[in-house]
Amino acid sequence: MRDGSARPSSIHRPELAFIRVSDFGSSLPAVSAPEQEDSNMSTKTHQGGEHHETAADHHESAAHHHREAAKHYESGDHEKAGHHAHVAHAHGLHATHHGHEAAKHHAENHK
């Protein structure tokens, strides 16, 4: 939302779309493990920072959907209002998850 787009870029990533196992026949392609990071503190804080950014993006999306829900409730369109309220709740759950991940990262790496 900082760049003026309708959706935060960190939560709208088409490359993360669902893939059916049947698309790969009887086996899934191998995925290599992430490379180990060095013990440089700036590298470690970057991952925690990404969780904070993602949490903030989800909070912003939740706020947007809560505002949309309020507009629809005011106009009497309770079905659309309920939809936006549900989406807002989901974004809130994702925001909380990333907040917890950031806190966990901090606890594990900044003793």
Image (cartoon, grey):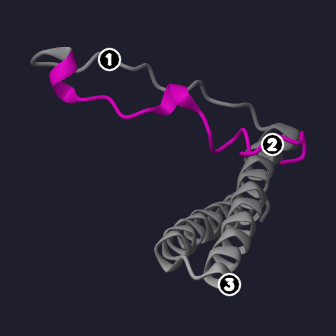
Above or below — where is 69 with respect to 48? below
Residue 22 colored magenta? yes
Can residue 109 be seen by looking at this rendering?
no
Dot 1 amino acid type: Ala
Q: Which residue is mark 2?
A: 46
Q: Is residue 60 above or below residue 54?
A: below
User: Mark 3 or mark 2, which is nearer the start of the sequence?
Assistant: 2
Q: Judge whether 14 appears above or below 42 on screen.
A: above
Name which quarter of the figure residue 74 lies in.
Answer: bottom right
Magenta region: 1-23
Which residue appears farthest toward the left when viewing the image? 26
**Residue at 81% in and 40% down:** 5
Q: What is the three-letter code of the residue carrying label 2?
A: His
For discs 1 and 3, the disc positioned in front in the rendered view: 3
Q: Which residue is mark 3?
A: 74
Q: Where is 24 relative to 13, above or below?
A: above
The percent position of residue 77, horizontal first and vertical second, equals 54, 76
Residue 62 is left or right of residue 110, and the answer is left
Which residue in the structure is indicated by mark 1? 30
- Tell me if label 2 and label 3 are in contact, CB under 8 Å: no
Q: Nearer the viewer, residue 80 or 38?
A: 80
Crowding at dot 3, Cα within 10 Å, few <14 / some 14-19 / many 20+, comes out as few
Disc 2 and disc 3: Cα gap in Å? 42 Å
